[in-house]
Amino acid sequence: MLRVYHKSSRILYNTAPEEFIDRVSRQAMLGIAVLTFIVPPVSADLFSASGPVVSGKTARLRFGRAAAPKNAPLAVKRAIWAANQLRSKPYRYGGGHKSFDDRGYDCSGTISYALGAAGLISSPMSSTEFSSYGERGPGKWITVYAREGHTFAVIAGVRLDTTPYDHYTGKWAPRWQTIYRPPRGFDARHPVGL
């Protein structure tokens, strides 16, 4: 019988009796077991698990970073903290579509990153896909506004967008935006329960 032990979590892995396992299968299973303990999940290193918090029900901006409401659900806080990580990333058309981890992000890549960190989606989505995401209408904590060609979100009262809406003074990049953007022409969607 092949046994694999892991000290830190005291896991014991037993396989079928040895006579049923050929040498190649044993090596393959051992390799998989070892990789399970060596390679951490992508989200463990990619997304921030902590960040600034404030009292109240609305996030607040300070120097371009959002502080999450202290009493917000953990998913909302994680979405905010993850979006803060994108402040230094440039706008890049198609960025964040193949993977949450990218050099730059477009609108739907930005929203995908935040929702992925919150555990609300498992892979990046396009603007068109966000038009049918979750439930219809504004959410209590998170609202995604989507139409073909663009998407943005309001998370705990603060807009996450790649366009400043004021096209004359703002910068195109994944950022928290301070200027109100009317949702006219967008489908409002929200994660179930949020």
Image (cartoon, rainbow, N blue to C red):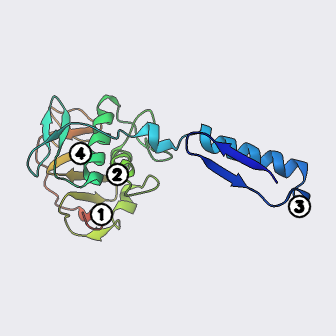
**Could you say where residue 106 lies in the image, as x and y percent from the top left?**
36, 42
Q: Quadrant of the C terminus?
A: bottom left
Q: Amino acid at mark 4?
A: Leu
Question: Label 3 vs label 1: CA separation?
Answer: 47 Å
Q: Secondary structure at mark 4?
A: strand
Of residues 134 and 194, the one drawn nearer to the viewer in this rendering: 194
Residue at (50% x, 42% y) in the render: 42
Q: Which residue is mark 2?
A: 118
Q: Amino acid at mark 3?
A: Phe
Of residues 186 and 71, the one drawn nearer to the viewer in this rendering: 71
Instruction: Verify CB contact (< 8 Å) between mark 2 and mark 1.
Output: yes
Ranked by sequence position, the earlier of labels 2 and 1 is 2
> Which mark lies nearer to you, 3 or 4?
3
Q: Which mark is residue 160?
A: 4
Q: Which residue is mark 3?
A: 20
Q: Secondary structure at mark 3?
A: helix
CA neighbours of label 3 inside 10 A, class few (<14), some (14 to 19), many (20+): few
**Could you say where residue 117 lies in the image, as x and y percent from the top left?**
37, 47
Q: Which mark is residue 191?
A: 1
Question: Label 1 vs label 4: CA separation?
Answer: 16 Å
